[in-house]
Structures are given as C-alpha cells and as structure tokens.
Image: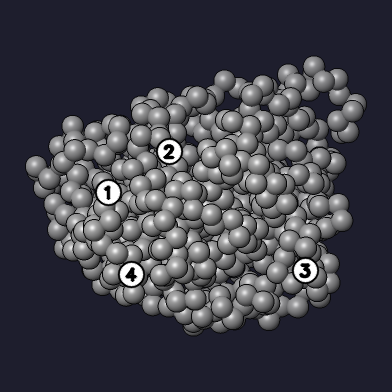
Amino acid sequence: MPIATIPRAVLSALLCCCGAAWADPLSYAQYDQVRTTDLHLDLKADFSRKTLSGYAELTLDWLAPNARNLVLDTRDLRIAQVRIERPDGRWAPASYLLDPAEPGQAEKGRALRIALAGQPRKVRIYYRTAPGAAALQWMTPQQTMSGKRPFMFSQSETINARSWAPVQDTPAVRFTYSAHIDAPSGLRVVMSAENDPKATGVGGWNFRMPQPVPAYLLAIAIGELEVRSVGPRSAVYAEPARIEAAAYELADTEKMIEAAESLYGPYRWGRYDMLVLPPSFPIGGMENPRLTFLTPTMIAGDRSLVDLIAHELAHSWSGNLVTNATWKHWWLNEGFTNYVTTRIVESLYGAEVADINLQVEQEEALASLPSIAPAKQALLTRGPDTDPEATYTDEELAYPKGAWLLRTLEQRAGRAVFDPFLRGWFDQHAFQSATTEQFVAYLHRNLLDSHPGLMSDAELDEWLYGQGIPANAVRVASPRLAAVDAQRSSWLRGELATDKLDAKHWIALEWMHFLNDIDGKASAGQMRELDQAFGLGKSGNNEIAYRFFLSSIKAGYDVRQPLQAFLMSVGRQKFVVPLYAAMLQRPDDRAWAQALYARAREHYHPVTQAAVDKKFAGK
C-alpha cells in the first residue's frame, strides 16, 4: 500500500516500538526481534550527481514470533519505495515511515520503520544516496594523481554505512552480502568482498562476501585503478601512477599473513588484498575484510612503515573475526589489534625493532593523557550500553592502553600460556560480536582462575575502568632508544653538534622518537641545522616529515615551502589537523595558514575538513 494513503498518526501507531531496550544506543535497529542475515546491493554510480541509486535487498531472520516491524538505520537517504517478498515469490509494496531526526543526533540519521502484516523473508528498499553522504567521498579528476578520471571511496566506520545503504548499522549484527554495481566505463569497482582482478566491468561489477560482517565493514571504491599481485593470496590496487611503488612497499604481505597464522590460527577470509587510496583518505588504514584500505602516506620507498600493514592485517583476527558488540567496547577491536601487531612485527623483524615500536607507542600514549578528558581515559565506562550519553574511550588511547593490558597478562603468564589463551578467544568467538563482559568471563575461565595471583579483580578493574595507565604497568625500555635519548639531550643543550648526531643509520622509529621529544624544545637554529644535515623537510617518510614540520613550526623555523607541498598532497587527518593547529598558535603563521587551507581544503576528506574548520573557528 502506498505510504501516502495511510494517515501519519495511524502509521506511527502501527510502527511504534514495543518497549524493548536496544543494546546499541547508536542504532535504531530492533535486532532482538529481527536480524539481517544477508544483504544484496544493486546500485548505479552517478559521478555527475554524486549518488548511488538502486535497491538494497535484506534477507531476514525473525527472532520474535510476534514482531511485525522492521526498523533500519538511514542517514540522508531518499527512499523511493519499499517492497516485500510474498510467500509465492512475488514482490508487493510495503508501508514505511522515516522518523524525524532526533535533536542533536544528526549522525544517527533517521529510523526507517517498515510496517508488515507478517514476517517476510526478504525486503527491498529502493533509494538514492545524498551527494554529501557521510560515508562517500566523490573526487573530481583534479583531486586524483592522473587528473583524468574521477574517484569515489567509502568510509563506513563507525556509523556511516547507513548513509549509503539502509541497514541495521550496528556491529552487533553480522550478515553476508553480494552486490552488482554499474559504473562509468573505464573505471574499476572494488569492494570489501571477493574481487576478481581479471574482471572487466562489462555488464557491471559483481561481488560476493561469503563471511558475515557488520555494516561498518561494507566498503566500495570506484576509480582509475590497476592491480598487481604481491603474493599467492594478496594483490594491491592503486592509481596507475602509484601502483609500482605500492607493490614494492607491500612485498612482505605474505610473510605477515604467515606470521599471524602461526600465532593465532588460519586466515579465514580467503584473500588479503589491499587498496591504496588517493591522498585525501583521512586515516591510516581501514580493515575492510578482503580489501584493506590504505593511506598513501605509508609508502616511504623503504618499507619502513609496514607496521601499518601489520595493524590492518591483525584486524583479520581482532575486529573483523571477533567484533566489538557496540562501540562502547571499542578497545576489543583496537587494543587487541595493537597487541597482535607488535607480535607480528616481532616475528618478522625481531624483538629489538618490536621493542622500539612499542616504546614509541607507549610514550606517545602517556604524552597524550593531559589532553584527554579523565572520563575518556578508561577502556570502558560502567554505564549501561543503552545510555546514548555513555562516554566512549578516546579513540587514540584505546589502541595502546588495551594492548598494554594484554601485554601485562602475557608477561605474567608467559607466552606458552598466553598465546593459546588468546588464540582460543579468536577461535571460540569467530564471526561473532562480543562485549568486554564476555571477554572478562573468558579471561577468568581460561586464565585467571587457573593462575591465581596473576591479576586481581581490583587491578583488572583499574585497567578497564580507571584513568590513565596503571602505575605498575611495565614500560618497554629499548637500549637503542636510550642511546637516542642521550644524544637528543646533549644536542638540545648545545653540547653535541648537529653534524655529530649518530643518526645516519637510524630507522624511521628512531627518528620519530627523536623528533617527538624536541617538539617545543628545539630552537629555530637547531631545526635549520637538522634540516640541512639530514634533509628532513624533504623526507619521503611522512611520519618523519610530519614530526619535523610540527617541531619546526613551534620553533619558528621557516618551512613554508616544503610544508605547503606536504599539506597540498597529504590528507591524512592525523597529520593535517595538528599542523594547522600549530600554525594557528603563531600570529605570524595564521594568515599564511588560512590562505593555504583555502587552496588545500578541496583536496581533503569531509571528515578532515570538519576537523580543520573547527580549529580555524577556535573550537
């Protein structure tokens, strides 16, 4: 029945909630009543309108016998019609209602409520995305490397999948999916699914994801892409001008997969392919299964930043295989992944390099604490999951603090005990969504109860619910970094000349460690000497270049020429936002930064734009 034939008040009554409490405060989905088990997308990409249009077909598993409503998450979707599959296989129209947006909850979007007479097995929603869909960035040819063809990519995490597909947008619901995508000729479509490197796109692009995933792992990209094999079960996709450099940088991928498998069991996703995105990609990487999305800033030319690949690969076990049930339990994804990353790095490159990496990580975590609200320093808050105002852990702190907790358990139990324990967690919860309470129960049952004294409940609570890092946490102390510290201190005091720094053989992590602790301490003259001696302003390693530029701005050393090139070509939020923020603190740099941002802004992702806009607005 067409929606217009039913009075809104009557329809609202038909579609009202039945009083149940949903576990995920960021989703409208009533997934205790009905769950999506499979999703099929049939969409057409229109670059001129910056839209995807078509339909989403959901296969449903009805859990509550009396349930008659299907509630989906949407954000800025234009719904054309809803149809249900009848028992005879025919499709019939269904009535639906889009709720008004909640005040102050724009990111949640609007609930799509579908009124049903029974419990159909399948529902189709015909729709079109908005040109400004939060998950999709539509890039002009000028924003790509070749300057010839447009590009589009998605970023669904955490709750942006609802802006390009009507779904139960919560990590608590997992589903398989397939897709048929029509795109302009000459552009390749790839998704977080089975990608055929030999596909031509004639008749459209077809995909299948046989393993169940939550909505935030739905991913798509369309652009001028080439593909290179980098291993027996891995390939990399990238823009033509970047494909060879990307393939070189990712040559150790198979070794990483094998290292992770030796620790935590078989890789369960078939292939591990990667997509190197245009520079506007706002984060380091996104662990979309079967097709990790990567920032081009990890391409240093010497494979010195491959720990980023190790991190995204580690998500194949922690995050993708076992997923946080709601975003309140974020640390189960990222803390576990950071721990696994260090183990992969150690397996491939040795304990010395792993310790350097870990010490830098721990130091940066401790240095970040003064800028993080105390309530956001806990891995978990004690409030109920149903509280939409629940405080979520600071994103950046969840990574190192969660890993530090696991490392503490490993150090006390020993790897002979801890490694099987952690693999058991992945094996027993594979393709499931989990809460911290479930992990704590597993921890007691499989480790703490059989090893009394290893960690008390009070100490565990301090790790989970306390502020900062527990005082008794063991910090890594790398002898190589201690030598860097000694040289840095002498250099800052003027006792060691710049050209006497024994830095020619430092690895990237040693340079990062050195630069982290001169921020705000070195003089303009010292930064000039450092640049002249080691060419840091021209470094191909973006992690090093970023730290050098940040310290130079604060020291008053003029790096405008290389900094302009950097900010015009790099869109990673981690780099862009702090650099503009630092310039805004200096009256001499503010006008120049404003003029630069006016030119560079269109090259940044909307997420990055919003963050920099806030800095210029003084927020």
The x, y position of residue 409, in whole percent, is 20, 50
Please name the residue shown 74% across and 72% down the image: 146
Please name the residue shown 28% across and 56% down the image: 494
Between residue 593 and residue 474, name the one nearer to us.
593
- Lateral position of residue 112 relative to residue 439, left or right: right
**Residue position for label 2:** 394
Between residue 46 and residue 80, name the one nearer to us.
46
> CB atoms at circles 4 and 2 under 8 Å apart?
no
Whether residue 359 appears in this view of the structure is no
**Residue position for label 3:** 147
* CA–CA distance in space, label 1 to label 3: 44 Å
**Residue position for label 1:** 404
Whether residue 514 appears in this view of the structure is yes
Q: Nearer the viewer, mark 2 or mark 3?
A: 3
Where is 542 relative to 257, above or below? above
Please name the residue shown 43% across and 38% down the image: 394
**Residue position for label 4:** 499
Q: Which amino acid does label 4 sit on?
A: Asp
Q: What residue type is labelled 3?
A: Gly
